[in-house]
Amino acid sequence: MIAPRLKPKVLETALYVEDLERAGRFYGKTLGLTPMAQDSRMWALDCGPASVLLLFKRGGTLEPIDLPGGRIPPHNGSGSLHLAFAVGSEEIPAWEKRLAEQGVDIEARMKWPRGGVSLYFRDPDNHLVELVSPGVWANY
C-alpha cells in the first residue's frame, strides 16, 4: 500500500507591525477582518474558514512565550512583506470601489495569463497586500 501524499495548507500568515491598533483597524476597516484574539504583542484576525492573519508587534516576540500548553519559540520579521487574499472574480470591481472609499490607493493592477486579476496596495506598515481572483496559479 502506498502512503497518501500529504500536503499541508497554510493556516496562519504573520506580519510584523509597529502599531498593533493601527494595523488591526486597517485590516478591519479595509478588508472587514474581525479580531479573534488580541493582547499586547499580537492580534489574530479571522480571514474565513481555517485562515488567520496574525499581526505581531515588531520586536515583541523575540523571547519564547511559555503557556500552560507549551512554549512558542521566538520569531520576528522586518522589511516590506507581501501577502495575498483570495477574492472572487466578480468581486474585483466592488473591491476597487471599497478601497477607493477607504482612501487606499491601488498601487498596481495585474491581469494574469490564466485569467486572474490582482489588485496591489500598501498597509500602514508598507507591506504589499494583494487581492487576487482565481486564474493566477494552476491550483487557483
Image (cartoon, rainbow, N blue to C red):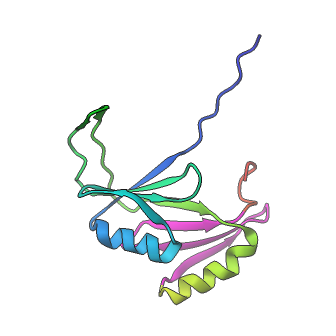
In the image: residue 113, left or right of residue 49: right
Residue 3 at x, y percent in the picture: 70, 17
| Visible residue check, residue 121 | yes
Pinpoint residue 105: horizontal percent, then vertical percent. Answer: 50, 83
Name the foreground residue: 25 vs 99: 25
Residue at the farthest top position:
1
Task: Magenta stretch: give its range.
Answer: 104-133
Q: Quick check: is 131 in the magenta stretch?
A: yes
- Does 2 sit above or below residue 52? above
Residue 124 percent across, percent down from the top left: 37, 74
Quadrant location of residue 20?
bottom left
> Can residue 125 be seen?
no
Left or right of 124, for residue 91: right
Q: Residue at x 48, y 60 (%)?
A: 82
Task: Let me know if residue 32 is in the magenta part.
Answer: no
**Quarter location, residue 37:** bottom left
